[in-house]
């Protein structure tokens, strides 16, 4: 049998302009953290997302760290670096990548996780409202748009405003997605108080690495520009009044992102086509794709599947391993992931919720029904029923969603997945 090409979850899709911009940078000797590619990319990104200012940084995580510092200073002027959120609880998305959450801890804050809703797989506004009842002193919310699907922004922004809380918007996975609600509208990355996007290698637009801080506030942009270049003061020598970071994007990386960014609309269109083909291919299966609201247009970064409970065979997961028992007509995420691997295709489990991660085991978790940690055995069943994140992690998986997957490749994937339901 001929060797089949690997079908990736989501790999870089490059075009040619990337190389051109990198070549120009090298030929003109702008091989540093200043240069034309950085300047042009910042203009492009701000215009595309619809914000006034963009600051190019080394990663999305760095951009989120800058967001946490700014939010901490705003809430409490004069806080010490590394302690901008000291003693503060911060509400955050629970089903997300840990880079949403870690920067809270870099600044000594305490993440409290807010459970997920079923309509977009993002932060549940009902649970968020409950969390403000349980922790009325909280003034910061970190919100991610999972897999490029916009969260319920109308409700979340309204709740945050009523409670006087700032919003860090983690749009790392959602560049190009947009939301047009009754009260809130715009592109993801323009919907919070402090915004971050990522250009990591598997994101919809990439520079191999990289990230961007986005804001409408000139003073915030200036601070991030300064902090990210070691906080150098305007003086003839290296003069420092506050702690700095080496977080600026390289002009080489910026060249790749700048070239790749020219093709974002094509990337979104091809990702959407992948999603639509899955929808057709799985229409008769006891399963659904990751959903979105009518008022939202996702970027379709990853297509995911959620198996109906009645079609789940028994599956248990430990911290690092799993077991399942195959039953006719039933399947589970781990069986499907194995079937994909067997045809050289890459799927992935749903991002394991943060409240289930050993590192955050002692942190608060709030569901739509209230405090989500089981206090006693008597309460466990009740809490599990309400734990939407754990349920989606149990029954869901990310399907191969690569831009370069051909319809033929995708037919093979669909066939492999369908066979698991037999
Ligand atoms: C990728 C990602 C990040 C981090 O971005 P990097 O550029 O990899 O540092 C943050 N949050 C979410 C939700 C992500 O998917």
Image: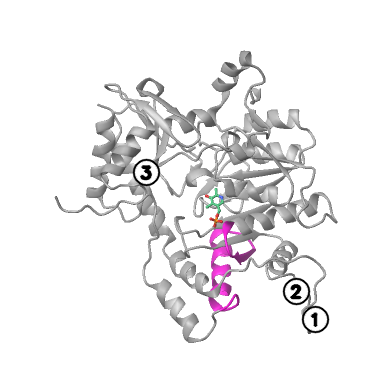
Location of the C terminus by quadrant is top left
Q: Secondary structure at mark 3?
A: loop
**Is residue 55 one of those drawn in magenta?**
yes
Tag 2–tag 1 contact (CB < 8 Å): yes
Q: Give the x, y percent position of residue 271.
A: 38, 50
Evaluate whether residue 149 shows in this view: no
Which contiguous range is marked in magenta? Answer: 32-60
- How dense is the environment of label 3, judged by Cα within 10 Å: few (below 14), some, or many (20 and up)? many
Separation of marks 2 and 1 at Cα, in angstroms: 8 Å
Q: Residue furthest top?
A: 378
**Is residue 177 one of those drawn in magenta?**
no
Residue at image mark 3: 347
Tell me if 234 is positioned left or right of 15 in this view.
right
Evaluate whether residue 158 shows in this view: yes
Residue 123 sits in quarter: top right
Separation of marks 3 and 2 at Cα, in angstroms: 45 Å
Q: How many marks?
A: 3
- How dense is the environment of label 1, judged by Cα within 10 Å: few (below 14), some, or many (20 and up)? few
Residue at image mark 1: 235
- Label located before the other in sequence (3 or 1): 1
Q: Residue furthest bottom?
A: 28
Separation of marks 3 and 1 at Cα, in angstroms: 52 Å
| Closest to the observer, 272 or 309 | 309
Residue at image mark 2: 232
Q: Secondary structure at mark 1?
A: loop
Tell me if 10 is positioned left or right of 363 in this view.
left
| Closest to the observer, 399 or 359 | 359
Tell me if 86 is positioned left or right of 112 in this view.
right
Q: Which mark is residue 116?
A: none
In the picture shown, does residue 130 fall above or below 51? above
Q: Give the x, y percent position of residue 95.
A: 55, 38
In the picture shown, does residue 327 fall above or below 193? above
């Amino acid at each position: 049998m001929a060797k089949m090409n690997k079908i990736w979850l989501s790999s870089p899709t490059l075009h040619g302009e990337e190389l051109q911009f990198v070549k120009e940078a090298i030929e003109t000797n702008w091989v540093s953290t200043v240069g034309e590619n950085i300047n042009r990319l910042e203009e492009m990104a701000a215009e595309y997302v619809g914000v006034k200012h963009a600051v190019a940084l080394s990663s999305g995580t760095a951009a989120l760290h800058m967001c946490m510092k700014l939010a901490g200073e705003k809430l409490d002027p004069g806080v010490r670096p590394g302690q901008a959120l000291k003693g503060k609880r911060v509400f955050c998305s629970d089903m997300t990548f840990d880079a949403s959450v870690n920067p809270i801890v870099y600044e000594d804050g305490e993440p409290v996780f807010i459970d997920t809703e079923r309509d977009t797989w993002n932060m549940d506004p009902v649970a968020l409202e409950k969390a403000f009842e349980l922790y009325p002193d909280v003034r910061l919310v970190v919100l991610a748009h999972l897999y490029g699907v916009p969260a319920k922004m109308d409700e979340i922004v309204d709740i945050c405003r009523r409670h006087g809380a700032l919003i860090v918007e983690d749009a790392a996975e959602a560049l190009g997605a947009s939301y047009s609600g009754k009260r809130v509208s715009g592109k993801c990355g323009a919907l919070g108080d402090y915004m971050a996007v990522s250009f990591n290698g598997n994101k919809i637009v990439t520079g191999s690495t990289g990230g961007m801080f986005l804001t409408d506030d000139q003073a915030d942009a200036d601070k991030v520009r300064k902090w990210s270049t070691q906080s150098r003061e305007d003086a003839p020598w290296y003069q420092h009044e506050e702690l700095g970071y080496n977080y600026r994007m390289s002009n080489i990386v910026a060249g790749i992102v700048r070239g790749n960014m020219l093709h974002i609309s094509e990337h979104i269109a091809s990702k959407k086509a992948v999603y639509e083909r899955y929808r057709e291919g799985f229409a008769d299966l006891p399963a659904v794709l990751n959903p979105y609201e009518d008022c939202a247009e996702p970027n379709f970064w990853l297509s995911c599947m959620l198996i109906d409970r009645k079609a789940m065979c028994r599956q248990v997961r430990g911290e690092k391993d799993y077991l399942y028992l195959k039953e006719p007509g039933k399947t589970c995420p781990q069986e499907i992931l194995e079937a994909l691997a067997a045809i050289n295709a890459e799927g992935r489990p749903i991002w394991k919720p943060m409240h289930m991660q050993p590192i955050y085991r002692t942190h608060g978790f709030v569901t739509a029904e209230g405090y989500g940690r089981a206090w006693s055995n008597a309460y466990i069943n009740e809490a599990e029923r309400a734990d939407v994140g754990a349920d989606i992690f149990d029954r869901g998986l990310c399907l191969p969603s690569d831009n370069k997957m051909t319809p033929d490749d995708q037919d093979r994937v669909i066939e492999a997945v369908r066979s698991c339901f037999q």
